[in-house]
């Protein structure tokens, strides 16, 4: 059974930093894209960042580019999201996702086959 488990969320003041982790188990994702999405209350789930299986390609939403950094450690089957210069508008539940297809680089939530349970990030002003 495949599981993605996020950790690292919490409450932080504006301008602060958090590092989210997503540990995968049940299969290896070293050839598969992984992503971080987020969903604020009353809003649709949106992409924050994507990383390719090798880690050589990344994509960031305009709203987080320059502040967030996605990375992965394939030896640990784990993805990370380093979030710096956090703003109140970054407040959301953050979800880790993994693509079941090798070699693709999807940007839409429906393209991802595996999801974590989510971790709350709250940024106070």
Image (cartoon, rainbow, N blue to C red):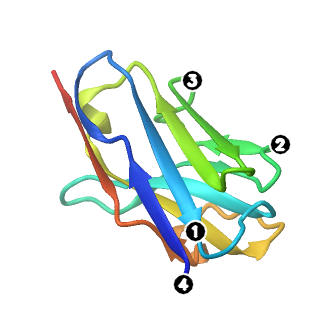
**Horizontally, is 51 left or right of 57 in the view?**
left
On the image, the x and y values in percent for residue 8 come to 37, 41
Q: Residue at x 78, y 67 (%)?
A: 104
- Dot placed on the residue nearer the N-terminal end, 3 or 2: 2
| Image quadrant in which you'd find residue 69 | top right
Q: CA distance from mark 1 to mark 2?
A: 22 Å
Q: Counting residues from the N terminus, which is met first, the one under dot 3 or under dot 1?
A: 1
Classify mark 2: helix, strand or loop.
loop
Q: Nearer the viewer, mark 3 or mark 4?
A: 4
Nearer to the camera, 2 or 34: 2
Give SS at disc 1: strand
The structure residue drawn at horizontal position 50% and vertical position 31%, both measured from the top left corner, is: 82
Proximity of marks 3 and 4: CB atoms separated by less than 8 Å: no
Quarter of the figure with residue 83: top left
Within-10-Å neighbours for mark 1: few <14, some 14–19, many 20+: some
Kindly identify the residue that appears in the image at 58 percent across and 73 percent down.
112
Which residue is farthest bottom? 1
Q: Kindly tell me whether residue 61 is visible in this rendering.
A: no
Residue depicted at x 55% and y 78%: 2
Closer to the chain start, of discs 3 and 4, is 4
Tell me the residue that label 2 is attached to: 56
In the picture of the structure, the residue carrying the numbered disc 3 is: 66
């Amino acid at each position: 059974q495949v599981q993605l488990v996020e950790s690292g969320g919490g409450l932080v003041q504006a301008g602060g930093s958090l590092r989210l982790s997503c540990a995968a188990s049940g299969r290896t994702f070293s050839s598969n894209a992984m992503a971080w999405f987020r969903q604020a209350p009353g809003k649709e789930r949106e992409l924050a960042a994507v990383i390719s299986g090798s880690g050589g390609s990344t994509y960031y939403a305009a709203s987080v580019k320059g502040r967030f950094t996605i990375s992965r450690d394939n030896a640990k089957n784990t993805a990370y999201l380093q979030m710096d210069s956090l703003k109140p508008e970054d407040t959301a539940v953050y979800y880790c996702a993994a693509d079941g297809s090798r070699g693709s680089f999807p940007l839409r939530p429906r393209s991802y086959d595996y999801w974590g349970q989510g971790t709350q990030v709250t940024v106070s002003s």
